[in-house]
Image (tube, helix red, strand yellow):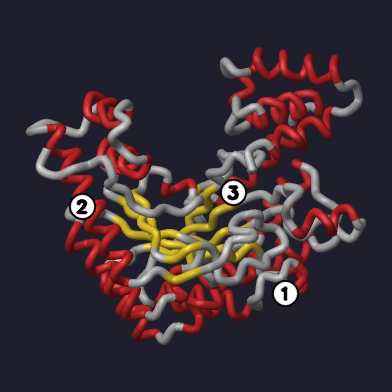
Amino acid sequence: MPFPVKDLAIEQGPIRPPSEARSLFIRLTRNCPWNRCLFCSVYKRAKFSLRSVEEIKADIDTAAQMIAHIKDLAGSGPVDDRVVSQVFHSASYSDSFRHTAAWLYYGEGSVFLQDANNFIMKAGDLAEVVEYLHARIPGITRVTTYARSKSVGQKKPEDLRRIREAGLDRIHIGMETGHDPLLQYIKKGVSAAEQIEAGQKAVAAGFQLSEYVMPGLGGKEMSKGHALDTALALNRINPHFIRLRTLRIPRKVGLRAEVEAGRFTMLGDEECLKEIRLLLANLEGISSQVVSDHIMNLMETVGGELPRDKENMLALIDDYFDLPEEERLLYRVGRRAALFRGPHDLAGPGRERAQEILRQIREAHPGREEEILRRMADQFI
């Protein structure tokens, strides 16, 4: 071994987008500087802090050391099952070392910068870190990060271009909604106009932009306004990706108190799906990729490129509602048991298992199917 490995580790945050599951994680900031959104359970009671450029560079250097060591284990061959097994089954390696081995194994070359909003950093510092990352770790194919609309919108166009030219490729922004009354209600700390301005500036600077939308966030009270105004905002931004993340409300979030006080009425699975249909039907004149890659969504197969696949996405939803009620219930059980991705899976090998789960639910909890399905969905939070 060219250097000791036992204590090699880098700091990593708690979350990343599903699309970044195979990325290398480098933490630039800790937690969330806003941390007031009623629907969010992440970072609660955790203090936000900036990491220094020197501290971040030290982690990048350590990541480069780990990569070199893992490649040394592989010799002249690839980082394959043998190498990964050696790293994962040895007490000499940290969790972040194992994560790095998995990153090399998958070979996608993407890097995700944590935590919730790295655009709160000074533009020069962020650009310096990204440039250093590319210099120290060759073969990177994509660098991405979370950001708040407010922070992106406050950056000058020339600063955004500087960060982009340094090698930051994609920004993930939690729009959630474009409905101003709902943005105020959930304490998002940004207006629809500010969301639109930030999205347009990000696209103009050359970033790939992912905007996250949260079906169900308006409850029954604001469902229609949520869908229609979000579509209007997205039409003005034309992001590269529109990612759907259906609302769940764990007990530790502020929105739970609103539910218990009767001020917020949750939508059911099928009501959320109808809201998604209304959103999609009103997306016009854009070329975004719609993605539903999350277990919280009732139908993971609703996705495609706009405008080409719009009618197909709407048809998939309509086909679901054309199913008999018992088949829709069976599908929901299979989906919440992680057996199904879309209604076509009803004809697949998971059907018998879903039928058995539904039988057990009815036997143990007669008349309480909806309650049990909500609990099954909540387990993935």
Of the residues shown, which amino acid type is indicated by label 2?
Ala
Of the residues shown, which amino acid type is indicated by label 1?
Asp
Inter-mark Cα distance, 2 to 1:
45 Å
- The quadrant holding residue 256 is bottom right
Which residue is pictured at 69% across the width and 51% down the height?
Answer: 247
- Residue 320, relative to residue 38: is it above or below? above
From this viewpoint, which residue is outermost toward the left? Answer: 76
Which residue is pictured at 54% across the width and 54% down the height?
Answer: 243
Query: Could you say which is closer to the camera, residue 248 or residue 133?
Result: 133
**Residue 226, x across and y down, in percent:** 73, 64
Which residue is pictured at 35% across the width and 44% down the height?
Answer: 96
Q: In this view, does 112 lie to the left or right of 373?
A: left
Q: Compare marks 2 and 1 and give the one earlier in the sequence.
A: 2
Label number found at residue 311 = 3
Inter-mark Cα distance, 3 to 2:
47 Å
**Residue 360, x across and y down, in percent:** 78, 15
Q: Name the residue under label 1.
A: 180
Inter-mark Cα distance, 3 to 1:
28 Å
Could you classify mark 1 by the number of other residues whose Cα lies within 10 Å: few (under 14), some (14-19), or many (20 or more)? some
- The quadrant holding residue 299 is top right
Q: Compare marks 3 and 1 and give the one earlier in the sequence.
A: 1
Q: Nearer the viewer, mark 3 or mark 1?
A: 1
Q: In which quarter of the image is the C terminus?
A: top right
Which residue is pictured at 66% across the width and 49% down the height?
Answer: 246
Q: Do the residues labelled 3 and 1 touch (CB within 8 Å)?
A: no
Label number found at residue 64 = 2
Could you classify mark 2 by the number of other residues whose Cα lies within 10 Å: few (under 14), some (14-19), or many (20 or more)? some
Q: Is label 2 in a helix, a strand or a loop? A: helix
Q: Is label 3 in a helix, a strand or a loop? A: helix
Query: Could you say which is closer to the camera, residue 322 or residue 355?
Result: 355
